[in-house]
Image: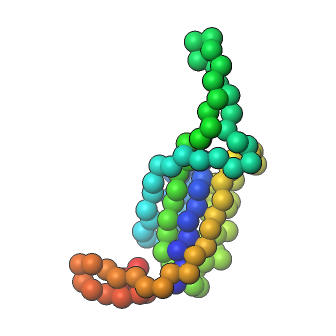
């Protein structure tokens, strides 16, 4: 099992959700996060004053899947979240040691 963690632009969330639903992924966790990568934030103008925005709003999507779905899921997220502009995001793939469904006690693949 793997845990896929994707940091994407907020306006791409619906596209990603629809795309992963089409390949049969049923459950995701979404968090609103802030951060920066190579772009190091940006400056904005508000009421005539310029100020630095160090942390940009992003969305973190986490999905636990069986190993056989990892490649397809990563490709799907990449295509759905792509704009071609700086700050499109990153995808991280982690080994998932164990999963437990609290309600039933099911383990691992059955818990997903």
Residue 26 position within the rendered picture, expressed as x and y whole percent measured from the top left: 43, 70
| Percent position of residue 42, x then y | 68, 33
Is 64 in front, or is 19? 64
Q: Residue at x 52, y 56 (%)?
A: 60
The residue located at (67%, 38%) in the rendering is 41
User: Where does the image place residue 2, in percent across and percent down from the top left?
Assistant: 54, 79
Report the side of 79 relative to 62 (left or right).
right
Q: Determine whether, in the image, residue 103 is placed left or right of residue 49.
A: left
Q: Is residue 83 above or below residue 107?
A: above
Q: In the picture provided, is 101 more to the left or to the right than 95?
A: left
Quarter of the image that includes the C terminus: bottom left
Residue 61 seen from this side: yes
| Residue occupying image coordinates x 62% and y 37% | 54
Q: Total number of numbered labels?
A: 0
Q: Which residue is farthest left?
A: 103
Q: Which one is in front, 23 or 37?
A: 37
Q: Quadrant of residue 23?
A: bottom right
Q: Which residue shows up at 62% across the image and 14% down it? A: 49
Colouring chosen for the image of the structure:
rainbow
Percent of width and height locating residue 99:
40, 82
Q: Quadrant of residue 45?
A: top right
Q: Is residue 8 above or below residue 20?
A: above
**Is residue 66 in view from this perspective?**
no
Q: Is residue 49 left or right of residue 106?
A: right
């Amino acid at each position: 099992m793997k845990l896929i963690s994707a940091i994407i632009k907020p306006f791409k969330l619906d596209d990603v959700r629809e795309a992963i639903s089409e390949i049969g992924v049923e459950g995701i966790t979404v968090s609103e996060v802030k951060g920066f990568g190579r772009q190091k934030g940006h400056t904005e103008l508000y009421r005539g004053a310029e100020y630095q925005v160090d942390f940009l709003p992003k969305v973190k999507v986490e999905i636990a899947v069986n190993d056989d779905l990892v490649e397809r899921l990563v490709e799907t997220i990449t295509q759905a979240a792509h704009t071609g502009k700086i700050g499109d995001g990153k995808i991280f793939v982690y080994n998932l040691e164990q999963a437990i469904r609290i309600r039933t006690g099911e383990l691992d693949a059955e818990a997903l």
